[in-house]
Image (tube, rainbow, N blue to C red):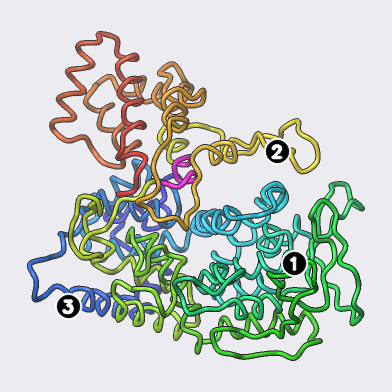
Amino acid sequence: MGKFMQRVRGLYVMTGVLLVWVTSVSQAADSPYEAAAEIDRLLNSRVLDSTDSPVGLADDATFLRRAFLDVVGEPPTADDVLAFYLDDTSDKRRVLVNALLADEAFGKNWARYWRDVILYRRTEDRAVAYSRRILVDYLAKEFNSNQPWSKIATAFMTATGDVREKGETALIMAQSGKPEDVTAEVSRIFLGIQIQCAQCHDHPTDSWNRQQFHQLAAFFPRIAIRPDRSGEQPTFNVVVNDSPFQYRRRRQNNNRYRGTPEHHMPDLDDPSSKGVLMQPVFFVTGSKLPLGTRDAKRRGKLAEWITAPTNPWFSKAYVNRIWSELVGEGFYEPIDDLGPDRECSSPETLDYLAKGFTENGYNIKWLYRTIMATDAYQRKSLSRRDYDQPPFLANCPQRLRGDQLYDSLVSALDLDIRTPQRGRGQGSYRGRRDPRALFNESFGYDPSDPRVDIGGSIQQALMIMNGPFIAQGINARRSKGLGALLRANPDDKDVLFELYLKVLARGPTATEKGTCLAYIRRVGNRNEAFEDITWALINSTEFIHRN
């Protein structure tokens, strides 16, 4: 991001003047901060009569790195850290959040997050090759222009067209256009309700039944994914067939190339039969459409009903997910398993925040400003494994997503590998040598999984310890990175301080400083010693986590 704070606030106290747009944002955005105060009051009221108490707020260094990684997906530069340290104004955290939300990297970071939400549970592996990049481009543009979440969700549910050119087709492409699979993901992602558990039988733990699942699937029977080889590159199209005539469903290698006029619930006792004809009915409200309704109205009406302010699950699903990403644990866990039969850890707080999100027109940046202004977000970080108290009395450390870790390494080591490298593969598999994509194959994870279930692997440890681009990055003979730092600073203490700023966004503690300087003297080779220290820092638990 490079001297981010200089661009935003003119190195803060060196000019002493806020940029006009930052001032106007702060003055016009009182409601998020009022909402944040009420959220903290609601959360704190749960423990007033108990021995539990919240931990203190995180220091500036922790908050700065946390905010950068959460909002833009990469760590602050050394210049950013020093500028934040020097700023003595009372509103610098609020100003920082506003500035980060205005940066284009915000959209890219969260587009990559939602790329993983949509593609990780795919049934069609080719969706990764065909849809990954355009999905990120589409979402980044939508997030940066602060389009309402309801508009984005509607686009995914009603999408048609070339999956290479229209990012909103990715969800349907990822599920091969199969009504049952699309239905499951629409409900899971946009409602937080795992109704797919009712596909073959009534839900074992929720009140949803099998008929309700297939009534929801009846909104999607006319879509399909059809191959298209008419252009320079092969692709797929999300297509619709609104023919009123019944016809045999065409399949090839279990692919669905044509839709069907209506959806039938399979007969479990006689799988070869056509099954029971299902009318489109939205299970949350009971709203329905007649048989024979054209596809555009089916999916359009469903999107309208799902995103309606009167449907609480749409807002709660998004709020719960983003809260979990920022605070470290959701009101519901897992974050995509909500519903009236599920336990919510602080229902009054979620209701209040979801209501505010809805009343603000599903304004995404309003939600980030609100959550990040709370004490719940700004508290010190403690693992739930080590912190046996009610939720939200501390922030929780989170393992960095693959993209965040990749960008952190690029920044810390001054690596110049951000541009994708075209591979020698054919067709949809060209570009698989994109270093970011390859890195994500090892370090990516399903962001819908509970954070406590996400851990490292031997493959990941070996890649960070011995990966070729890691060895390149810590090489003290390079013209950039550590090499440039050593040549510019003959004083080992200065190099150590700047190295810690670059890698961990903080200076070394007295103990760390003493240990490192003693190690440098013992090794007797300055380059070799600092290579070892750099290697140790990027392999540390602190580096691969957001605290």
Query: Residue beneath label 3, please?
Result: 45
> Is residue 404 covered in magenta?
yes
Neighbourhood count class around disc 1 (C-alpha, 10 Å): few under 14, some 14–19, many 20 upward: few
Determine the residue positioned at 46% across, 83% down: 312
Quickly name the residue at label 1. 271
Report the residue marked by disc 2.
431
Height in image: 361 above or below 118?
below
Residue sitting nearer the eye, 27 or 107: 107
**Would residue 485 be found to the left or right of residue 283 on screen?**
left
Residue farthest toward the front in the current orientation of the protein = 269
Magenta highlight on residue 522: no
Q: Position of residue 364 (x, y in %)?
A: 48, 71
**Is residue 477 shown above or below 538?**
above
Residue 159 location, quadrant: bottom right
Q: Is residue 197 left or right of residue 547?
A: right
Residue 190's x, y, as percent? Answer: 54, 72
Identify the residue at horizontal 36%, vertical 32% (top origin): 538
- Residue 357, x across and y down, in percent: 43, 79
Report the number of numbered marks: 3
Amino acid type at mark 1: Pro
| Element under disc 1 | loop
Nearer to us of marks 2 and 1 is: 1
> Which region of the structure is painted magenta?
400-407
